[in-house]
Image: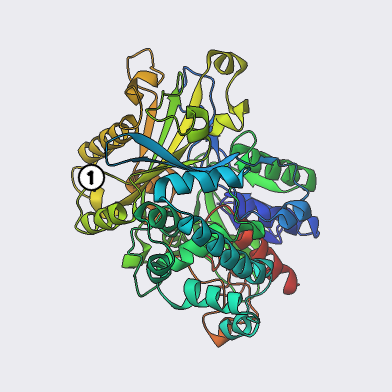
Amino acid sequence: MKSADHSSDVIVVGSGHNGLVAAVLLAAAGQRVRVLESRAAPGGATVSARVFPEYDARLSRYSYLISLFSEQLAEQLGLKLKCRSRAVASFTPWQDTSGRHHGLLISNQDSERTRASLRQLCGSDREWKALLRLEELRQAFADIVWPTMLQPLRTRSWFEGQLQTAVQREAWKSFVERPLGEFLERTFEHDLVRGLVLTDARIGLSVSPHDEELLQNRCFIYHVIGNGSGEWRVPVGGMQSLTDALLQRCRELGVQIDCESPVRNIETGTRWHTVSWEHSGREYSATARHVLINAGRSTESAILGQTWAPQPADEGSVIKINMLLRRLPRLLTDSASAAEAFAGTLHLNEGYQQMLDAWKRAQCGEIPVPPPGELYCHTLTDPSILSAELQERGFHTITLFGLDMPWRVFERDHDSRRAQVLQHYLDGISAFCEERIEDCLAVNSDGNLCVEVMTPQDLQREAGLDYGNIFHNQLSWFFAEGAEAAGKWGVETAVRGILRAGSSAQRGGAVSGIPGWCAAQSVLEQR
């Protein structure tokens, strides 16, 4: 082993986007920063890849849209990052009593079209008015909460003291105090509209809308407050563009990044901590005043010599399916074109009752049929992830995110169940199309369809997501959950100088950069 090297002020373990955010901020403040990454390339879950090597298409393998990454933070970091708005927010296929196919289209550009689409579904403007009310409550809530996300933790009572209007108080009660299902059931009447709103509370979680622990509320909040608007935008060039922008800033600021360097141990001290890692068959160590861990709790515990056991609420619930299409399928409805339907979030089997039934089956370890999920086509908003040739030929990518697919569903007969779930989703997409979706998919030279499927187990193995949880563990509230946490950054551990700089920190989860920012601020406060 090499002798200890005091050349770093800060060592960051893991090069996911949060770790890189912290590295940029600290290096810009004059700190000497070293990043250690176990994989061959940096980026964590914010990476793109040529998933189907025969085709020049770089898909965002894990995360795929951006909402919570603050525009203020991007400016502070000096990032050259471009995101585009989607013309369509969502499209939900449905059938009338005679079996004719229609679709509920929520437009980001034409409110009258949204209103007309809701009227066709419901027969009146009631649900349109209910959605306007939801937006009023969401905006009032976001106006209070979002500006605090890059600040030290405030107490719950502080937030309650900011509630000056009836709208703010109703939003707080609906989103923070009571199960979200109560709000949905008193506000909306139509099953499809209830389900449309509920999806934001169940991405990555298999949870009831009436769960008393309010995990669904926390998930909903993080999905609707991003940058104050809650809009989910498409990163131009795919998720790799965020990682590339951060890496460019790291290079400019002299951050040292060592890939294929898995950390084995952190020996904690009173002022200095010693980090040991491997590279090319040799062992190395270095010391630093601060060590930022941008990894899940299992990795954190292992390198600190601690034990870790996930809680039931830490269980991940997701199946991620990446597809490359030769062309978009023809739809059975004339409510929207295929380009409109797939450009936004297309909701599949996500009626309110459908999701309740799916949740009950998933809790018993059964595959929910039909499975709820949502998909969108990146290339309709940003074709740059395809080569010019594939663009000319009309190729597209589709990302599908499956709901109510918890770890327990795949604990036995994993590969067989993964194949079954894929077929259920292909059937679900084909049900509202004039043709089988398989007939539209690109095919490799070996005859296999260009489809990549990842279960929670696959995500743990490939992306290091504990228990397959895209948030690393159960989502926290946005406020201090105890008096001792007030005024802190939500990144502290029991050891001074050892900080969490990833999704497992408070206010972590999603592609936000918030834990990275908060870890950097905590370091700078202690200088």
> Is residue 322 toward the left or the right of residue 6 in the image?
left
Q: Residues within 10 Å of mark 1 (few under 14, many from 20)?
A: some
> Is residue 390 toward the left or the right of residue 474 in the image?
right
**Compared with residue 153, is residue 351 higher up or lower down, i.e. above or below?**
above
> Is residue 300 toward the left or the right of residue 419 in the image?
right
Which colour scheme appears in the figure?
A: rainbow
In the rendered picture of this protein, how many numbered marks are placed on residues? Answer: 1
- The residue nearer to you, when weighing 284 against 104, is 104
The percent coordinates of residue 336 (x first, y second) are: 48, 32
Q: Residue at x 43, y 69 (%)?
A: 183
**Compared with residue 34, is residue 321 higher up or lower down, i.e. above or below?**
above
Q: Residue furthest front?
A: 124
Residue 80 appears anywhere in the view = yes
The percent coordinates of residue 145 (x first, y second) are: 63, 70
Q: Residue at x 56, y 29 (%)?
A: 379
- The residue nearer to you, when weighing 123 against 310, is 123
Q: Residue at x 61, y 80 (%)?
A: 159
**Compared with residue 492, is residue 204 higher up or lower down, i.e. above or below?**
above
Secondary element at image label 1: loop
Q: Quadrant of the C terminus?
A: bottom right
The percent coordinates of residue 246 (x first, y second) are: 69, 45
- Image-quadrant location for residue 102: top left
- Check disc 1 and report the residue beneath it: 369
- The residue nearer to you, when weighing 232 against 250, is 232
Q: Amino acid at mark 1?
A: Val
The percent coordinates of residue 110 (x first, y second) are: 61, 43
Residue 11 appears anywhere in the view = no
- Image-quadrant location for residue 73: bottom right
- The residue nearer to you, when weighing 52 against 440, is 440
